[in-house]
Image: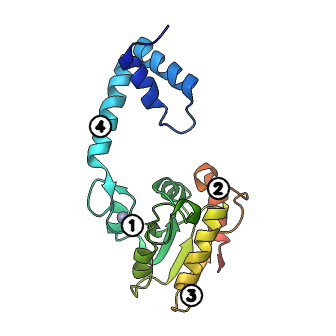
Amino acid sequence: MKSPSSLQELIDALRCLPGVGPRAAQRMAYHLLQYDRAGAQRLGLALGNALQRIRRCSLCNTFSEEDVCALCLSPKRDQAQLCVVETPADLLMMEQTLAYGGRYFVLMGRLAPLDGIGPREIGLDVLRTRALDGVVKEVIVATNFTNEGEATAHYVGELLHGHGIKVSRIARGIPVGGELEFVDAGTLAQALVERREV
Ligand SMILES: [Zn+2]
């Protein structure tokens, strides 16, 4: 039996979520419509609101409802330290370690030359300007320990080399191929403490 078209559209739409295949999407759609219509309504509203309100901080690129995010505005954050992460989700992970008190720069991803993603596409020119503003003393590179994340870290090291600022890389407590988002906060905190200069 074929699903009604708006139901099929919902199933197809749910498949944009990471790790959700056709069967899982189907289960979710049927669940929402049968058992949790209030939840579905809430989900729809929250999605619409988030899409409308959330943009990127003009300083660090992370998600924000304002032009400059609360973290960048906070006088409590150490301006001399700048932590470079791949995504807003990675920033959140770093924050959850409670081990870091500096500021951030969120790349728009990572270098992936084969996919046409070069330094400019991930804002490395903007990062360079930010890092060399005279206030930043240390850049901590916390990109993922994947090939692309490592290549990006290496590039950032080269980019900032010889400008009198320290560039360090979080240590490997993170498994090879590991993505920050999926590492526990304790491991990540340790990797931050054991960071080494690059
Ligand atoms: Zn910000």
Ligand 1 has an atom within 8 Å of the beta carbon of the residue at disc 1: yes
Q: Earlier in the sequence, mark 1 or mark 2?
A: 1
Q: Earlier in the sequence, mark 3 or mark 4?
A: 4
> What is the C-alpha distance between the residues marked 1 and 2?
24 Å
Q: Earlier in the sequence, mark 1 or mark 3?
A: 1
| Ligand 1 lies in quarter | bottom left
Q: Is residue 66 left or right of residue 117?
A: left
The crowding category of the residue bearing disc 2, from other C-alpha atoms within 10 Å (few below 14, some 14 to 19, many at least 20), is some
Asked which secondary structure carries label 2, the reply is: helix
Q: Earlier in the sequence, mark 3 or mark 2?
A: 3
Q: Amino acid at mark 3?
A: His
Depth-wise, is mark 1 or mark 2 nearer the camera? 1
| Res 37 quadrant in image | top left
Residue matched to label 3 = 161
Labels 3 and 2 touching (C-beta < 8 A): no
> What is the C-alpha distance between the residues marked 2 and 4?
34 Å
> What is the C-alpha distance between the residues marked 4 and 1?
24 Å
Q: Is residue 151 left or right of residue 10?
A: right
Mark linked to residue 48 = 4
Looking at the image, can residue 143 be seen? Answer: no
Q: Amino acid at mark 2?
A: Gly
Q: Amino acid at mark 1?
A: Cys
Q: Earlier in the sequence, mark 4 or mark 1?
A: 4
Depth-wise, is mark 3 or mark 2 nearer the camera? 3
Asked which secondary structure carries label 3, the reply is: loop
Residue matched to label 2 = 186
Q: Earlier in the sequence, mark 2 or mark 4?
A: 4
